[in-house]
Amino acid sequence: MPYAEENTICKVQTTATVDMKTAGKTILYTVPIGKTFYPVQVVIREASASLAGGTEYDFGTGANADTWVQNVDLSAMTTASTDFKVIDSGGTKYTDCAAASEFGIKVITGSTAACTATIDVFGYLA
């Protein structure tokens, strides 16, 4: 039976309590064996505190999560539990996410205060 994710753009993963302050990579989605993943959007929501100071986050595969969207500034998300931001590809050329690769977020310059957020990943498999 084919994956539902092959027939439509859909939410492939939700990851709660992602650390938005501490530098490092968090895996958001692991591509199934034998498939290629094409990310379309990421939604950052339900921050536990202000993301002020969070001026650089990268998304993608590899150790640096830098194959999709880079230099995302989330510092305007200052109201806990209500602000959200939609990140999309913006028409730029990217590298697809190969089978077994790990799509994630890497905090480069995180929030000033300790903060977690829920992150939804949308896309499709081929």
Image (cartoon, helix red, strand yellow):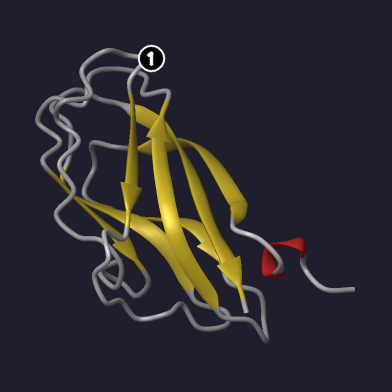
**Going by the picture, which residue comes out furthest to the right?**
1
Depicted 74 relative to depicted 7: above or below: above
Q: Residue at x 44, y 65 (%)?
A: 103
Q: Position of residue 36 (x, y in %)?
A: 56, 80
In this rendering, would 25 be left or right of 76? right
- Looking at this view, is 23 or 2 the one in front? 2
Q: Total of numbered circles in the picture?
A: 1
Residue 22 found in image quarter: top left
**Quarter-of-image position of residue 109:** top left
Above or below, 20 relative to 45:
below
The residue depicted at 26 percent of the width and 59 percent of the height is 90
**107 versus 68 height, above or below:** above
Indicate whether 113 appears above or below 126.
Answer: above
- Dividing the picture into quadrants, the one containing residue 93 is bottom left
| Left or right of 58 on screen, residue 15 | right
Seen from the viewer's position, the closer of residues 39 and 92 is 92
Judging by the rendered image, the residue that carries numbered circle 1 is 82
Counting from the top left corner in percent of width and height, residue 76 is at 15, 26
Q: Residue at x 57, y 43 (%)?
A: 14
Q: Position of residue 7 (x, y in %)?
A: 71, 66
Question: In which quadrant of the rendered image does the C terminus lie?
Answer: bottom right
x 31%, y 72%: residue: 63
Q: Amino acid at mark 1?
A: Thr
Tell me the quarter of the image containing the N terminus.
bottom right
